[in-house]
Amino acid sequence: MDSAALFAGPALRRLRKREGLTQAAMAARLSISPSYLNLIERNQRPLSGRVVIKIVDEFDFDPRALREDETIGGLDGLARRMSDERFADLGIDRDELAEFLGAAPQAAAAFARLYDSAMPQDRKDDPIAAARREIERWRNHFSDLDTAAEALADDLRLSRGDTYAALAERLRDRHQLAIRILPREVMPDSLRRLDLHARQLQINEMLDPASRTFQLAYQIATLEYREGVSTLAAGASFTDDTARTLYERHIYGYVAAALIMPYGRFLRACEATGYDFAVLMRRFGVGFEQLAHRLTTLQRVGQRGLPFFMARIDRAGQFSKRFAGASGASILEAEDSCPLWDVHLAFERPGTLCVQPVMLDGAEAAPAHWLTMSRTVDGRGAAGAARFAIVLGVEARLASDLALARQVSLRSEDAQPVGAGCARCHIAQCAQRSLPPNGAQLRFSPLTRGSIPFEFGG
């Protein structure tokens, strides 16, 4: 998929005014016509690569400032904030948000800042939420680290042999660390332990092969990419050390996945197989959760994959992981998951992939029609340790080429209506409903008892 065009009219207009130039003078500096500059400033034309280079050369300008909307997570970040139930009655759709962001990005950033600062104190102080906000600001794609990991994978020739053996050799030759698999009773509460005195990386025997390989890759990430990860964490301006540590742990895991599934080769395999999960898991020697993580990261400029979201959910419907990536999914913002979503059915069918098209209620500002795929995984990489369901989702309009979509209707009328938890869902006549929607006026009849738990109005 091609990268999106760069519309940066307001940023260019502010640069021109800062320099005290008329449109004619600015156009002359950039070697373009005044009429073309006028169109660019009104966001009616994108910036070409040649013009961007000219801006940088002429004005000593940081090109990252042209994507000022990225500081709030772009359109998807704005849409996630606007999906708050406090704005539900306004009916703001995605096109309206895009117009707001394009015409007044600074005003959009001000809204995002006010929204974030107005969060309930417990949410602002939640280190898990703080780490996730920073991950989503980057859309879970860290380009420099991804490229560096891909280069190392090429150096290690991971595509030509046993990945586990190659990573073990790297640890031995570069870091003088031997790999030792220890019995469960020796490491009852640890998956991996670095024993610098014995120069050993110790691995719990209960881990499956994919998890063992991941632990080796993770250890390499912590030893060789510490500077890059620390730089990212410092730029996040966390006020809480726990949030910073959680963020760093996520990025080390990101690097580990990028080593095992190098970007270019992985994306080519995805496209060649129609994102066939079973084939990809076998080809790269990874588990379903590792694969799901990687699928949310495919956003390299000029070499983009499908924009998946992923989440991990327990039997009680609680989210323990959620990454929207570039999907724009608002379904992950709920505190509870919908019981009509087949992610819950996955627990009744361990190891079986449950494929379900869904239509999300109240998603005016974000995509509503999704193809979702859910499967159970065993926690800690060891059978019986714990069980979760992993769900992947991609917009239905983009899913037609997926191998898993060939036997599924992608028509919107055939999708299962779902909500973002009962308290935020306004789907009427739902027999599975446990709570009425927040703020809804309940209706009661002295003569009739309906077949649904709650009847309500607007």
Image (cartoon, helix red, strand yellow):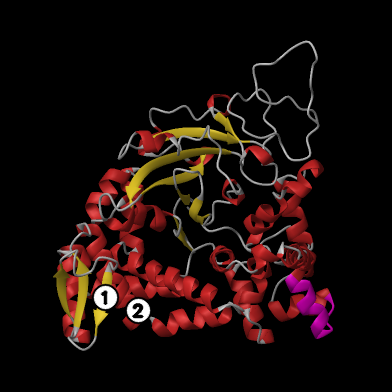
In the picture provided, is 209 more to the left or to the right than 233? left
Rendered residue at 29%/66% (across/down)? 189
Of residues 284 and 213, the one nearer the viewer is: 213
Of residues 71 and 24, the one nearer the viewer is: 71
> Residue 185 appears at what percent x and percent y?
19, 65
In the picture provided, is 187 more to the left or to the right than 424? left
Label 2 SS = helix
Q: Earlier in the sequence, mark 1 or mark 2?
A: 1
Q: Main secondary structure of the magenta part?
A: helix
Find disc 2 in the rendering and name its residue: 222
> Residue 413 appears at what percent x and percent y?
58, 24
Q: Quadrant of residue 447?
A: top right
Label 2 crowding class (10 Å Cα cut-off): few <14, some 14-19, many 20+? some
> Residue 364 appears at what percent x and percent y?
70, 42
Rendered residue at 62%/30% (across/down)? 433
- Kindly tell me whether residue 426 is visible in this rendering: yes
> Residue 56 appears at what percent x and percent y?
63, 82
Vertical arrangement, residue 449 with respect to residue 295, above or below: above
Rendered residue at 39%/52% (across/down)? 292
Q: Amino acid at mark 2?
A: Thr
Q: Which mark is residue 193?
A: 1
Is residue 19 located in the magenta-colored stretch of the structure?
Answer: yes
In the picture provided, is 22 more to the left or to the right than 47? right
What segment is highlighted magenta in the picture? 11-22
